[in-house]
Image (cartoon, rainbow, N blue to C red):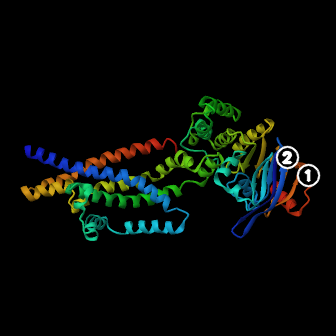
Amino acid sequence: MALLEVKELKKYFGDTEVLKSVSFSMERGEVLAIIGSSGSGKTTLLRCLNFLETANSGSIRVGEHLLFDGDDPAFKSSSRIRRNRLFFGLVFQSFNLFPQYTVLGNLTLAARLSAKDQTKITGEHESIDEINNRAYALLERVGLSHKCDAYPCELSGGQQQRVAIARALMLTPDILCFDEPTSALDPELTKEVLRVIRGLKSGDNTMIVVTHEMEFARNVADKIIFMANGIIEEIGTPEAIFEHPQSPILQSFLNNALN
Amino acid sequence: MSDFINVTLHLLEGFGTTLGLFFLTLLFSIPFGLLLSLCSKARFSPFRYLIRGFIYIIRGTPLLLQLMVVVYLPGIVFQSPLTKWEMFHGNTALSYFCGALFAFVINYACYFSEIFRGGIENIPKGQFEAGEVLGMTKTQIFFRVILLQVIRNILAPMSNEIITLVKDTALARTVSVVEILFCASEILKVDFIIWPLFYTGVFYLVFNALLTFLFGCIEKKLSRYWK
């Protein structure tokens, strides 16, 4: 059974149809790269999955949990959306770390708050020590354990993005999404962030990466979606997409992107 | 010399009232201003326009006029002057003080609300979204993530407003609040000496120096997080 199943997702901004019935599915442990030019709807798709935008119709299912059904308004209640968000993690293009918290604080804030809520409901919760230990382990994984007491403003862009990745992993999402994670970084820093993302693949994480890094998509992704004008124009293995592009739009996109 | 000490003591008494008005105004107008700024962004549009209209009226008329309206209007409208209100137990000074305080709180809350609104609108959207995707509630995001960033954004305009407030308290004199300028003019009327009136400036200056120092400290503290 597919881990993620997206069916006929549609999204309008005013009269503009940004997503025109997008459907795809992915398996656990897979890495999916979404490529396409700006305005093709790839970021909107990611934001719909993370419920930062609410799709107008269609459905989203993770495992046996139906997270969204455009026909049923009950799925649009804010508390339900908040719970459903935890199936997904999101790493932003501009990192969006919280400036007033240390690296450790950024990682643990949400976990500490939800532990507090949990105490009120069941009386049982993860202790602060457990939370901190998980955070240390993740920081080690992104190679930043020595920076746990630093503030975001003291870190390079690449380091900030690695912290943001660790922060997203803190909530153990089923699917980790990246929205152009390296677009705000110079080539050197891009490499260090991509290395971390590649490292996560071996850790059996399921990931969706919206990216302009064609090399990365080709080498790391198991499956690639090419989007144009709000539809999935082509979907396939890296080999199929890069070596045997079918549609003329993809061919010209690749020509521009690779040369 | 003993004159100087007596005058100083007398003025200090008045300055106590000035400070009371100052601190109480801050105490009430900051939360009220925050409430107004949130309401002025409410989704329900009639309510939003009502709040914005109210802010427009308060910001568009002199504080001096508002003071007079608050203190004298009850007597005209309800046929019962402020000084006769039961809650003041016939304490005239208290009733004038509370009337003035009310006007100051409303006036400053409106100014603060506009500053807060700007401060909130200047927070990058990504900060809210980062909190949301981490499963935090709106309240948690506001208090744990946004608030301190808002404080940093509004520190400069707020310190300006607050220092203006220190000096604006002098307007309360016109509605018989016995603050420092009132005391100094009493001395002028009774003893025919004018220098205490000029001397009051020193009190304002010293207090504003303290405030400036305090704001400097806060700014320094916050600069730790932003480079």
Residue A178 position (above or below residue A169): below
Residue B200 position (above or below residue B70): above
Determine whether, in the image, residue A175 is placed left or right of residue B49.
right
Mark 2 Cα-neighbour bin, 10 Å: few <14, some 14–19, many ≥20: few
Please, what is the three-letter code of the amino acid marked with disc 1? Ala
x, y (%) of residue B80? 24, 66
Please, what is the three-letter code of the amino acid marked with disc 2? Ala
x, y (%) of residue B220? 44, 43
Q: Are marks 2 and 1 on the same chain?
A: yes
Kindly tell me whether residue B200 is visible in this rendering. yes
**Distance from the alpha carbon under mark 2 to that under mark 1:** 21 Å
Residue A115, label in figure? none
The chain holding disc 2 is A
Determine whether, in the image, residue A22 is placed left or right of residue B40.
right
Mark 1 Cα-neighbour bin, 10 Å: few <14, some 14–19, many ≥20: some
Q: Which residue is mark 1?
A: A240
User: A8 and A202: which one is in front?
Assistant: A8
Q: Which residue is mark 2?
A: A2
Say which residue appears at 49% left-offset and 60% top-offset.
B39
x, y (%) of residue B181? 19, 56
Q: Which numbered disc flags the more N-terminal residue, 2 or 1?
A: 2
User: B61 and A190: which one is in front?
Assistant: B61
Determine whether, in the image, residue A235 is placed left or right of residue B105.
right
Q: Are marks 2 and 1 in contact (CB under 8 Å)?
A: no
Determine whether, in the image, residue B89 is placed left or right of residue A250.
left
Q: Quadrant of the N terminus of chain A?
A: top right
Say which residue appears at 71% left-offset and 70% top-offset.
A15
Q: Secondary structure at mark 2?
A: loop
Kindly tell me whether residue B197 is visible in this rendering. no
